[in-house]
Image: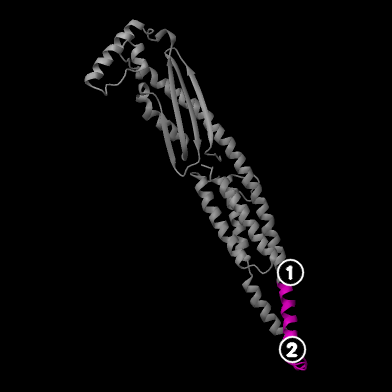
Amino acid sequence: MIRSMTAFGAARLESEPGAIGIEIRSVNNRYLDLNLRLPDDLRFAESRLRELVGRYAQRGKIEVRVSYAMAAGDAPRSIDPDALRALAAQLHAARALIPDVPAPTLAELLGGGERTALDAETWLPLCERAMTQALDEFTAARAREGGRLADAMLQTAREIAVIVEQVEADLPALIDSQQARVAQRLREALEAASPEGFAQIGGAELSARIAQEAGLFGLRVDVAEEIARLRSHLAELQHILGDPGAAGKRQPPPKGSRGKRLDFLFQEMNREANTLGSKSAALSVTQAAIDLKLLIEQMREQAQNIE
């Protein structure tokens, strides 16, 4: 399954002790970069939550935000204004001697100055369930976006296949055209050197010379290997993307990071397009090489978002 690295998932789990809310956002990244933001009261769940994310994602810059709210029946008492003023006076007196004394948190004020730790045995399973639900939604969103990216790349691959077929079909005509130009230039050169020299050269000798020049030209512009490799790369692209229409498909799509496989594959395709352009013998081939490079670059940019 092709999965994008750009997605969003969220979940909120209500329970008797309280509620857990989790949001997951991700963008593309070369490796897995996880930024987990959760309250200090839930710090005991950090290792387990990181482990769960690692099971669902291999690459991407992922940000996870965790929040919680205790049930109303377990909520601490409200703030007593008189006690709050007394506490402020005490804080002022303390800072007169120790200026960097921190102010109490709201949780400490609501708790009467004492911070009540959450029960790990109760809240850790809640965190795990909420994270699993958020990751399920997150993974589904990645799969949907990945499918759209795969369809776009397969459509671009079909356009590339059309260009490759056209170049291959036009190549014999290019060689024949060059052979005719060589023959014309030889005749013009002989006539310019000696008007009577042309009659002194036999037809077999002239034909051999033309064939030799045409053969050298054919070697210089032979792109059969480049075309064959481009077709092989297109077949591999269909295999990686799991295209059901791929001819001769026998093996399941490869496991691991398909984004990295695609990046390497597009580098190779771009190399073949460059070679095709360097062997260009006509404006049409040059234009074909340019079009190929543009299409390959489009696919490469789309592949940057694939895990």
Q: Which residue is mark 1?
A: 173
Q: Quick one: SS at disc 1?
A: helix
Query: Of callouts 1 and 2, which one flags the residue occurring earlier in the amino acid sequence?
Result: 1
Residue drawn where x is 61% and y is 61% of the image: 228
Left or right: 182 as drawn, with respect to 68 = right
Spot occupied by residue 17 in the image (x, y as percentages of width and height): 42, 13
Q: Which quadrant holds residue 170? A: bottom right
Residue drawn where x is 58% and y is 64% of the image: 275
Query: Local crowd at mark 2 within 10 Å, few (<14), some, or many (≥20)?
Result: few
Which one is closest to the eye, mark 1 or mark 2?
2
Spot occupied by residue 257 in the image (x, y as percentages of width and height): 49, 44
**CA–CA distance in space, label 1 to label 2:** 29 Å
Residue drawn where x is 42% and y is 7% of the image: 73
View extreme (left): residue: 97
Quadrant location of the N terminus in the rendered image: top right
Tell me, yes or no, if residue 220 can be seen here.
Answer: yes
Which secondary structure is most common in the magenta stretch? helix
Left or right: 104 as drawn, with respect to 242 = left
Q: Amino acid at mark 1?
A: Ala
Report the magenta residues as a range.
175-204
